[in-house]
Amino acid sequence: MSARDNILQRVRDAVRAPAPRPPAPAANSIWPPLGEAEARFREEFTALKGEIIESLPEFLAVFEKIATDGSELAGKGNATAREADLGVTACECLVAQTGSVVVTCRNAEERALSALPPVHLVVAHREQIVPDLNAALALLRTRYGGDFPKMVSVISGPSRTADIEKVLVMGAHGPKRLAVHFVRS
Amino acid sequence: MNPNACRFQRAARAKAFDLRHRAIVAKNIATYHAAVARGLARFADWESARRRAAAIKWEVMNHLDRYLEEFERNVLARGGHVHWAETAAEASQQVVALAKQHGVRRAVKSKSMVTEEIHLNSALEAAGITVLETDLGEYICQLRGEPPYHIVTPVMHLNREQIAATFHEKFGTPLDATAEQLAGSAREQLRAEFLRADMGITGANFAVADTGMIGLCTNEGNGRLTTALPRLHVAIVGIEKLVPRLEDLALFWPLLATRGTGQFLTVYNTLIGGSENLHVILLDNGRTRLLADAEQRNALHCIRCGACLNVCPVYRTVGGHSYGTTYQGPLGSMITPHLRGWRDWSHLPYASSLCGKCADVCPVRIPIHHHLLHNRRNVIQRRLDSPIQRLAFRAWLWAVRSPRRYALGGRLARWAMRIGIAAPFAKAWTDHRELPPAPRETFRDWWRTNP
């Protein structure tokens, strides 16, 4: 018998006697009303210390080495993620309820793009804002069926730690700054 | 008394009177409570949310065989690998074997309590593999050679000066370094390690059955770097970590973050799957024993948010290290005897005032203090309580079954208190407190004279 068979057999034997079922939860909404989606996104995202970039040229001017996944800033990227001062990516969607950006990666270079450079810029369309986490996950399922990208990240603000005396420090291991720029469509 | 119980009592006694420890932990937890209050305000109906989570976890745990098979099927279908480990030693050996097979010399680890549970670091180091913690708190623990003090906040017991002293000694940073400088130094040290590590090791906050994904929740981004950069990713997953559907995370992510730190979401909620570099190790290590106990099965619903530790008057007084367990506080006292044996850990369920605050705050509605009471019953049923205690309760039972014997007992106790021979029997109490003076008359006498 393999460890797998042993464990599964023990699990089967264990759950033969059912545990008392907890009371059925109420069907009411557990979240307060969302409000207007874009306004809510801006409010949540900036509360998490994310930056919304209105003027792209001005923002880009300070960076020397830029790495991109090719979208929206085509031609401007010239560095690899490991050496770049700025990583630019697209996103799957933005979540109004939580101020999050949902980024997916299919390969190692894409994964590094939103993780290694000290600044991460997400280029997005306003139409990509979805109301809540439920909608974001449902969108991923519809878009990919079973074939999800290798990494899905729901990113809510720049990297941070509060491990030392609960004092908030930005930029623990991931990007110190997270920015979103909305492209006119 | 078993050696673990002796160690616990000794450590607890020392910590309970360590005023610096008390001040550091109180400050940390006060900050936590303020954040959680803000976090809870983001829910319209917190109670419904946790009821929903409890229902989902009930569904998983009572059909765990099906969900495990579904999860395995989906990981395999997307090119990943699944291993099963019955014990801690088996899981560690599997990681070491994978490392050797792939020529791994250096590994980085994202914060994971299950790897503490199986003592993975020492197994890897014994095999000549360097392993580095990358969560700042865990990194500090590793530098100091200490186990984590808290499942979510590993260095809750240290103040900035103590951490700065450690960094000063190891890296020459200033003794008065700020939290920002210390985190910056760790970022610098670890960035190089991320880039040259051959293997990334993680646990899992969630394992999603219907998509075969590993869910990691971090704030620092170390979970993403650990899984994105090295060529091999090993995830060690307790079999209780499953959720049925991807969409369930829209509920579980906020529940975990709200009670874990007061955030609505941790910064990085990452899902990993579909890679041939992914090796998942599904770990039992005693979990099926707890699963077999239908009455206490829902103890496995725990999502390790750490809220029950923060509110527990015992945890706050004796501190996380006193328990001597991987999982501290009420949650640890609930599961450790089941997972690691009653003989060695029978004292843990008594490290509770049964006030029930742990159950109040639990985001998946585990009746933790009831389980602690059940565990005390289990201890008695296994005859692991002390013979003296057993005799005392027998005598008590005999006395209270007759009004005359009860009245006589009251008189004797009052007499013993008056002439001062009661104190030695109440030593555990009188070591730190005054015994109240004996009442002038018994209640019965008073009742008779005051009709």
Image (tube, coloured by chain):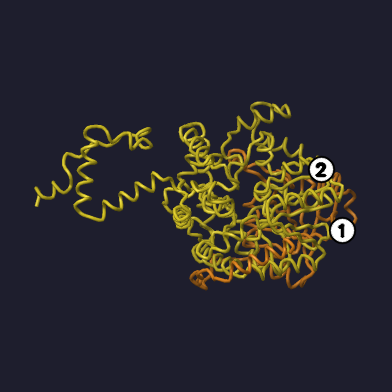
Chain colours: A orange, B yellow
Which residue appears at 20% of the width and 49% of the height?
B407
Q: Amino acid at mark 1?
A: Gly
Q: Nearer the viewer, residue B249 or B43?
A: B249
Other residues around mark 2 within 10 Å, as few (<14) / some (14–19) / many (≥20): many
Q: Position of residue B50 (x, y in %)?
A: 53, 63
Other residues around mark 1 within 10 Å, as few (<14) / some (14–19) / many (≥20): few
Tell me the subunit letter for badge 2.
B
- Residue A120 shows up from this direction: no
Q: Position of residue A80 (x, y in %)?
A: 88, 49
- The quadrant in which residue A138 appears is bottom right
Which mark, by number, is residue A70? 1
Residue A80 shown left or right of residue A18 in the figure: right
Residue A140 shown left or right of residue B275 in the figure: left
Which mark, by number, is residue B252? none
Q: Nearer the viewer, residue B321 or B405?
A: B405
Q: Nearer the viewer, residue A97 or B402?
A: B402
Which mark, by number, is residue B106? 2
Residue A155 shown left or right of residue B368 in the figure: right
Q: Position of residue B386 (x, y in %)?
A: 43, 45
Question: Do dots 1 and 2 share one subunit?
Answer: no
